Image: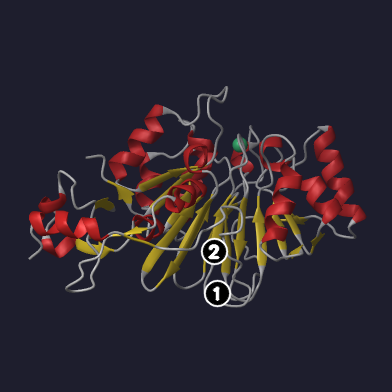
Amino acid sequence: MKKAKLVSIWMLCIILLVGCIQPTVSYETGIAEMDNMKLHFLNVGQGNAIFIEGSEGQTMLYDAGGDGEVGEYIVHYIRQLGYDSLDVMVISHPHADHLNGAPYILENMKVEAVYHPKVTHTTQLFERFIKAIKNSGLSLKTAKAGMEIPFGNIQVKVLGPCSNHYEGFNDYSIVLRVDNGQFSALLTGDIEALSENEILASGVEVQADILQVPHHGSSSSTTQDFLQAVNPMYSILSFATDNKYGHPHKEVMERLVEQGTNILRTDEHGNIVITYQKNQFIVETQQSISDANNKESSYIDPKTGEGLIKGNKNSKIYHMPDGAHYSSVKKENIIWFKTEKEAIQAGYRRSKQ
Ligand SMILES: [Zn+2]
């Protein structure tokens, strides 16, 4: 038994670990050692951009939009991971907040295949996108429900769009279910209730461990039925702080909380990187990494060598030894960590008390 008194004594035995993580290089490239799939939800401001790397070194970019010089940012990010090309680029739909970095990327990086829904836009941006594809010697591939996108040992099923015509561009969004056999993600672009319902009605498997919450958390999307069917462990929202659309909308946040999914948001967490190892998800965020730099102090019971930071497997919250709820975690839910960094990297949040 670990008594509070003992704990406070052992807290004096804090060992400072040497070694420091640089936020910009800590999303280690998996080209050599990764036997898994890694999803990078990039913090692009008001927009969407998700980079996927697989165990065979295969690479995909789903959406390339956001604020500022987002194309340059994405190219820099991918190069920093050690990749020089993209096997697949998917642009969910032609709105600028999903597309505006794509021309720069095509002009500056080798891309093997580009997918888009069967719809065109009249903007100069869209024209530049089409021109960049032609200049790369590519032809735009059309994605539609029922297709699969070749991506090595990762299965990529296209669940939407199900129809040929929609009133707005959002419902044209290409919806992908990405599955490497260990975990799955549903990427939804900006689909609204109409496309969500069509996908549900089509009877395909939508359940996924990770959900890119549709349309930046807009109330026109993420219906109760859709969310329940996907039943994600993690829900990722991509949007800028104080955006003019009011994203994410309160109703959606309430539905996500009600569903009991872990919510991660690019405005708060920065870049969010998720992978899965040894039966657990590993979540790294820019915020957690910078926090972790200050949280490498070890809390170890010298008798047993075990950590003294108490995680609750159920709530994914960790309690410091002097925390108010330290002793109230049920025995069967306890997981021990030696450092806060270890807890944060395992996807746990610090208890507020
Ligand atoms: Zn959007």
Q: Amino acid at mark 1?
A: Met
Instruction: Judge left or right: residue 178 versus residue 104.
Output: left
The residue at the point 42 percent across, 50 percent down is 294
Instruction: Judge left or right: residue 137 versus residue 35.
Output: right
Q: Quadrant of residue 219?
A: top left
For residue 229, above or below residue 213 = below
The residue at the point 47 percent across, 31 percent down is 248
Mark 1 lies on a secondary structure that is: loop
Residue at disc 2, CB closer than 8 Å to ligand 1: no
Q: Is residue 313 visible?
A: no
User: Looking at the figure, which quarter contains the C terminus?
Assistant: top left
For residue 146, above or below residue 182 = above
Q: Amino acid at mark 2?
A: Lys
Task: Check residue 34 in the rendering and tell me which mark sits there, or answer none.
Answer: 1
Mark 2 lies on a secondary structure that is: strand
Looking at this view, is 294 or 309 the one in front?
294
Instruction: Judge left or right: residue 262 versus residue 200.
Output: left
In x, y percent, where is residue 335? 23, 64
Marks 2 and 1, Cα distance to the nearest angstrom?
9 Å
Q: Circle 2 is placed at which residue position?
A: 38
Looking at this view, is 112 or 167 the one in front?
112
Image quadrant of ligand 1 equals top right
Specify the farthest residue to the top. Answer: 244
